[in-house]
Amino acid sequence: MHRNIDMSEKKRVQGGYVALMATIIISVILLVMTVEEGALGWNARFNILGTEAKEQAYALAEGCVDQALAAIVTDPSYQGNATITSTGGTCRVFPMQFDTPAAGFLTVKTQGEVRNAFVTLKIVVDTNDMYFGTPVPISWREIPNAE
């Protein structure tokens, strides 16, 4: 009871197989594209949050510089080496470096941290040149955290 399959029926069966495989391949491609677009949107969201945290950490480090300079004005023996924690993040004043890079200069280094975003600032102040009793920074730069 063997049945002979004529050519037209064979082409019809093969045509259905090709259509099925093409549909599966196109579906997989569309699924991959959809997942990829979703991942890109998700990553962009976290990049934006990271940028905002970095800006906030920079502002916190700047505030820490201002606080350290105010502390030096009110107490010339202030040595730094302090950590200040607030609801916005953590700020650290590293030990003051007096007479660095030369005599009469003061180097202040601070670090702001907000949601694992760090900014470290290094400020050099000429203590001989004060503006109304406040030291004026002559060098202000962000440095890598390892420095």
Image (cartoon, rainbow, N blue to C red):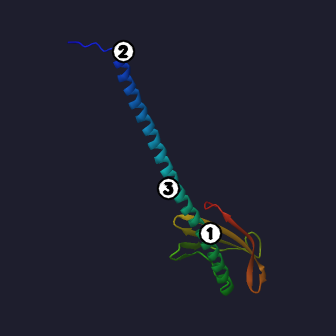
Give the spatial CA distance, label 3 vs label 1. Answer: 25 Å
Q: Residues within 10 Å of mark 3 (few under 14, many from 20)?
A: few
Q: Residues within 10 Å of mark 2 (few under 14, many from 20)?
A: few
Residue 7's label in the rendered image is 2
Point 58% across, 72% down: residue: 92
Residue, disc 1:
58
- Residue 113, percent across and down? 55, 68
Residue 94 in sight: no
Describe the element under mark 2 as helix, strand or loop: helix
Point 62% across, 69% down: residue: 58
Residue 131 horizontal side relative to residue 8, left or right: right
Q: Amino acid at mark 3?
A: Trp
Q: Say whether disc 2 or disc 1 marks the residue closer to the N-terminus.
A: 2
Describe the element under mark 1 as helix, strand or loop: helix
Residue, disc 3:
42
In the image, residue 8 sits, relative to residue 76, either above or below, namely above
Point 55% across, 58% down: residue: 47
| Between marks 3 and 2 in the image, the one whose residue lies nearer the viewer | 2
Q: Split into 4 quadrants, where in the image is the N terminus?
A: top left
